[in-house]
Amino acid sequence: MARRALKLAAGSWVPWYAAFVVAANVLPELAYALLAAGAAVLIVSRRLEPRLCSPRRAAASALAIAAAQAPLALLAAPSRPSPLRCAFAAVAAVCEELFFRGALLPDLGLLPQAFAFALAHVSFTDPVSLVESALLAPHYLLLGVALGLTAEACGYPASALAHALYNLLASLYTLPLDAGAVAALVLGDLIPVAALAAAGKVEKRKPANPP
């Protein structure tokens, strides 16, 4: 029985994803521990080695994703997060990248993993949280696409760096949840998606190095 459960855990991401979604609505700390454990099991069992790129390319991708928050400067109120909140934001980003871009991206592809990423951020704790998180679903979908493009080009370590930087910057302000703020957030998300997609097309057109 235990061997069968272990085989299922190593062979499918679905139980880990379902456990994360449920736990995220009850105890977020446990949710991210489950996500990290699931990512580790799936990555090791499938031998999913990350693609590597130059540090310059990885840094450029991270900065492009961070630039998505530029349109929010005029709408957001400054915040002073505690060191613990900043640490949690960074750790949560790394756990999400290991799972969604490290394990799910090779299995599902770019858009399906981004959809799963967005759906995982919908809160079912109460009606207000459900509506608010549903309004942010397009933002998380586009962010998942941008991070997926980064992982495809540079590997999930680079997308983890980008996501951690994004979360740290996002913790420095409080965004009012209204139509204007959501529109600005989605508009900002289009910046890295367009930039990273264009960079990927340029890279594919480059001729291979002669032997």
Image (cartoon, grey):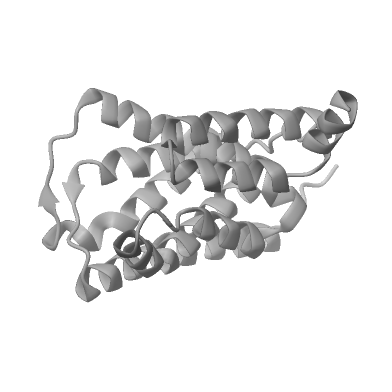
Say if 106 sits above or below 53 in the image: below
Give the left or right position of residue 19, taking residue 163 as reference: right
Residue under the image location 43 percent in, 30 percent down: 29
Q: Which of 134 and 127 is in front in this view?
A: 127
Give the left or right position of residue 66, taking residue 97 as reference: left
Residue 56 appears anywhere in the view: no
Instruction: Please tell me how many numbered marks the rendered image carries.
Output: 0
Give the left or right position of residue 52, taking residue 159 as reference: right
Q: Place residue 11 in its image quadrant.
A: top right
Q: Place residue 68 in its image quadrant.
A: bottom left
Residue under the image location 52 percent in, 51 percent down: 147
Residue under the image location 63 percent in, 28 percent down: 37
The percent coordinates of residue 12 (x first, y second) are: 79, 44
Quarter of the figure with the C terminus: top right
The percent coordinates of residue 171 (x first, y second) are: 25, 41
Residue under the image location 46 percent in, 57 percent down: 143
Residue 1 appears anywhere in the view: yes
The percent coordinates of residue 70 (x first, y second) are: 24, 57
Quarter of the figure with the N terminus: top right
The percent coordinates of residue 38 (x first, y second) are: 66, 33
